[in-house]
Amino acid sequence: MTKPFALALHGGAGVNPGRDYAEVEAHLRTLVEAGKKRLAAGASALDAVEWAVAELEASGLYVAGRGAAPNKDGVVEFDASIMDGAAMRAGAVCAIQDVVSPVKAARAVMDKTPHVLLAGAGATHFAHDHGLELIENAAQYFRMPIGVQQADIDAEAAELSHGTVGAVACDERGRLAAATSTGGTFGKRPGRVGDTPIPGIGTWADGQMAGSCTGIGEYFILAGGAGDVAARMRYAGLALEPACHAMLKTVARLGGDGGIIAMSADAVPAFAWNSHGLKRAAAGALFPTLVGIT
């Protein structure tokens, strides 16, 4: 007997007031409804989140993949991770360069190595060696994400300008998975790594929940991120949404902001944020399609 299935997406926490996000909302709706069809046709949660995040990266609408901004040295460095909750496996890359889809590189680390995380030049060489699609012409490839202006990228307070994409899913066999990808904060110091590529922080999936975080990564690392949500559920008996809000209270207390999307084993999504909005969408067997920005 098949179980209810669902997919939830985010295009990053933080919305700039007065800027038009209609294209983002339309893209998230189209993408999440296409992902729902994939799950209905029997796709695994793991394949669904990898596909969805790769599409978010390729769009250039968000601060990830094609929409990523260069660091202070003018180089684009990506972070990404993916986790299979059913098998308790994960793969991740950080400070990787040149790849079209960092989340696909993270999946390759999980599937083709005994490791969980590859970093910097090692991650880039791995992508080259395994035939992952590479960025041929950076000047033509990258684009400005929706809602972002050059002044945001030039800002001295780089931590105020950030973005991440992510997906969580539950498939018809009740399996959970999560994936997250980012270009990091604008104008970041070379080699800076946030929460996104750290399984247990930016991304987590197990038998009871899957989560993907977005925001100022340093504070999510200190607060425990998505893994903290899972721990609050497991050890304190909190339901999914209250556990998400509790983790974000810690982020806020430390001085950070952002959000999280999460999915329960019952295929019910949860969204929480303490920033100016969260670009989000969800579709599943048990509820109508949801798309929101603020």
Image: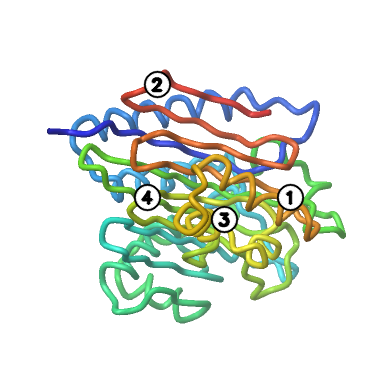
Are the residues at dot 2 and dot 3 in contact (C-beta closer than 8 Å)? no
Specify whether 94 is left or right of 74: left
Q: Secondary structure at mark 3?
A: strand
Q: Nearer the viewer, residue 139 or 130?
A: 130
Question: Disc 3 or 1, which lies upstream in sequence?
Answer: 3
Amino acid on which the number 1 mark rests in the picture: Asp
Q: Secondary structure at mark 4?
A: loop
Amino acid on which the number 2 mark rests in the picture: Phe
Numbered mark located on residue 287 in the image: 2
Query: Spatial distance from mark 1 to mark 4, Cα to Cα?
Result: 25 Å
Around disc 4, counting alpha carbons within 10 Å, would you say few (fewer than 14), some (14 to 19), or many (20 or more)? some
Around disc 3, counting alpha carbons within 10 Å, would you say few (fewer than 14), some (14 to 19), or many (20 or more)? many
Numbered mark located on residue 257 in the image: 1
Query: Spatial distance from mark 3 to mark 1, Cα to Cα?
Result: 16 Å
Front: mark 3 or 1: 1
Quarter occupied by the C terminus = top right
Specify whether 45 is left or right of 161: left
Around disc 2, counting alpha carbons within 10 Å, would you say few (fewer than 14), some (14 to 19), or many (20 or more)? few
Residue found at x 66% / y 43%: 13
Front: mark 2 or 3: 2
Residue found at x 59% / y 66%: 77
Question: Disc 2 or 3, which lies upstream in sequence?
Answer: 3
Amino acid on which the number 3 mark rests in the picture: Thr
Specify whether 260 is left or right of 204: right
Query: Spatial distance from mark 2 to mark 4, Cα to Cα?
Result: 19 Å
- Using the image, determine if residue 207 lies above or below residue 25: below
Question: Disc 2 or 4, which lies upstream in sequence?
Answer: 4
Query: Spatial distance from mark 3 to mark 4, Cα to Cα?
Result: 25 Å
Q: Which residue is mark 4?
A: 208
Q: Which residue is mark 3?
A: 182
Question: Disc 3 or 4, which lies upstream in sequence?
Answer: 3
